[in-house]
Image (cartoon, grey):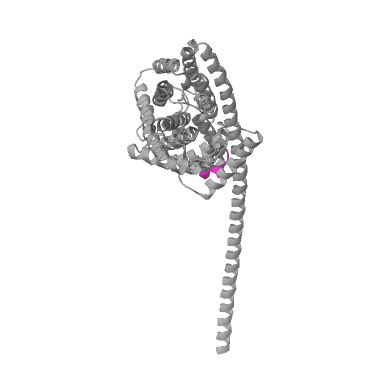
Amino acid sequence: MQNAFFILVLTLYAETFQDALLTFVKHTFFMKTIAAIRKNYNFIIFQKLIVGSVLIGFLAAFLGMSLKKITEHYESVFFNQASENKFLFVVFPAIGLFVIYFLRQYLFKKKENKGIKEIFESTNSKTKNLPVYKITSHFFNGFLTVIFGGSTGIEVSTVVASATIGSVAQQKENVFRKYKSELICAGVSAGITALFCSPLAGILFAYEVIYKKVSRVFLFTNGIAILVAFGVVTISKEAPLFAIDIATWHFRAIPYFILLGILAGMHSVYLTKCVLFFKSNFFKSKTQMTRIAFGAAIISMLLLILPQLYGDGYHAIHQVIENPNLVLTLTLALTFMSLIFIKPIITSATLASGGDGGVFAPSLFIGAFLGLLTALVLNTFFDAHLIPLNFLVIGMAAMLSASIHAPFTALFLVCGLTGDYTLFFPILLVCLVSKYTAKMIYPFTVYTIPVPLSK
């Protein structure tokens, strides 16, 4: 009887052990299968992110370089014609703004371009995307604004159009939906890289202005996009925008660099306030036609007085670079001061009346002449023995840093513009000074102002 009971217990135990063993084997196999599926799925996403980033980088670079080339060419043609016939300074801005208006009304769904704020609206929303027509809208509107004398630049137009390429890419693949911001930033990075021949400026702009955080996917996608974009730029043999021979800089100039940073920070707030003031007041006009007429009148009048303000103004910077041995006179000082203080007004009028663009090119323009004027004044009245061209370059970076609150973007962008890193440390110092000076006075930029400009 005891033996029979013992055998029964052993049998039940054996069956329980077999069941448990079988369950364990099944569970282990199931977990391995799940792990294998997850690994394969992640590998597929990894492959698709590579392909997507390569395509975004190539398309954004092609777009940026195309817009840059045709704008440079036609801006030069139109400006030369207007220089020979002053009446064209009156006609061109009105033509440009009216053409943009009709394109917007009948081709681009009656939607106004909001610049970089459109990117913020998309990255901050799970459902709102940048529609594909934004590529052509910003491309043509940015091009038309600059060649007809609108005093802004194509940089922001390129940024939004490039961001749209990234946005469209994430809409095409379901697996990309959760990487929306990263792919939009990849387009932005590639677009900036193509414009300024600086991969670091591209990815830093995407980080400092748009994304404002670091993730592995961000670094991966943006890294691939900027490398592709820079490859396209290198193959195309793009030269730096400003060929400046920078020999050296001196430690004794550091206090003067800091002074320039403070001046740039203060002036950037003036630029920001001008843009916000004009937009808020122009939007009170009942019709867009009234805004266009008023804006065109302001632009035309100022261009007649100061032709250097035409378009992005890079032609005026080139003229100064080609004549480095400037001597400060009353006329020259008044001209430079007029350019520095009137540029924000004409830029604001351009943007408020419907022109496409932002504060990138205006900041570089203002910074160049602010730096040059500062050096000439210090040399003339204080015998400072400064190198004016160094201050021109540093001024561009300082003003841009303060205007968009992105010192590292400004640093690498301006070094890319000149193709020279001799002034790396002075530029870094001044960019930090100008940014924090601007933030102390006014904590917002034209991109981050929280109050809506229109109803």
- Expressed as whole percent of the image width and height from the top left, the position of residue 363 reads 45, 31
Q: For the C terminus, which image quadrant?
A: top left
Decide which of 152, 190 is in the foreground and name it.
152
What residue sits 64% from the left and 37% below the top?
234
The residue at 36%/18% (across/down) is 286
Label tally? 0
Residue 335 drawn at (x, y percent): 42, 22
Name the magenta segment's main secondary structure: helix
Residue 46 visible to an observer of this rendering: yes
Residue 383 position (above or below residue 11): above
Quick check: 315 left or right of 403?
Answer: right
- The quadrant where residue 381 appears: top left
Taking depth in this image into account, of 181 and 394 the one nearest to the observer is: 394
Q: For residue 22, what is the image quadrant?
A: bottom right
Whether residue 448 is visible, yes or no, is no
x%, y% of residue 261?
40, 38
Q: Nearer the viewer, residue 124 or 435?
A: 435
- Tell me where the magenta segment starts and ends, as one range: 170-179
Residue 385, magenta (yes or no):
no
**With respect to residue 335, does 191 lie above or below?**
below
Q: Nearer the viewer, residue 438 or 315?
A: 315
